[in-house]
Image (cartoon, rainbow, N blue to C red):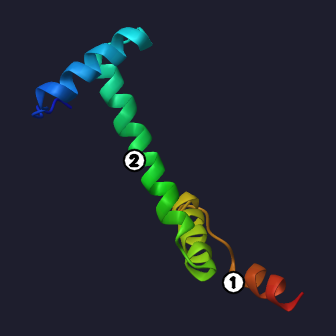
Amino acid sequence: MRKNIDIDNVTLTKLKILSVFENSSVKALMEEAVSFFVDYKEKERVASLSEEEKEDLGLLLLMQQANREDTVDKEEIMNILNN
């Protein structure tokens, strides 16, 4: 996806200098910076969750991975619950 953003000249100059040191393009450097920032914010958000919220999030992620086409007989569920 292509997006145009406005960057002030000082920041753009710094990006160009960093891209030379990193042997990378300005675009690649900006993409890496944005990815790093998003990852950092996600980790920060998860760290601030309570234990109950973390458990809820974990359950939600597991539920999203579940195969909805898999079915289980009622008897099998009852046998598991009885054990």
Query: Quick one: label 2, few (<14), some, or many (20+) residues within 10 Å?
Result: few
Instruction: Pick the residue in front: 40 or 58.
Output: 40
Left or right: 19, with 56 as reference point: left
Identify the residue shown where x is 56% and y is 58%. Answer: 65
Which residue is label 1 attached to?
A: 74
Q: Do the residues labelled 2 and 1 touch (CB within 8 Å)?
A: no
Task: Say above or below: 39 vs 71.
Answer: above
Give the left or right position of residue 54, taking residue 36 as reference: right
Residue at point 55%, 78% (across, down): 53
Residue 72 coordinates in the image, percent (x, y)? 67, 72
Instruction: Give the distance between the C-alpha atoms of the residues marked 2 and 1, in whole angstroms.
Output: 43 Å
Secondary structure at badge 1 equals helix
| Residue type indicated by callout 2 | Val
Which residue is nearer to you in this view: 54 or 80?
A: 54
Which image quarter holds the N terminus?
A: top left
Instruction: Give SS at disc 2.
Output: helix
* Amino acid at dot 1: Lys
| Quadrant, the C terminus | bottom right
Vertical placement of residue 64 versus 18, above or below: below
Image coords of residue 49 (percent x, y): 53, 74
Q: Kindly identify which residue carries mark 2.
A: 38
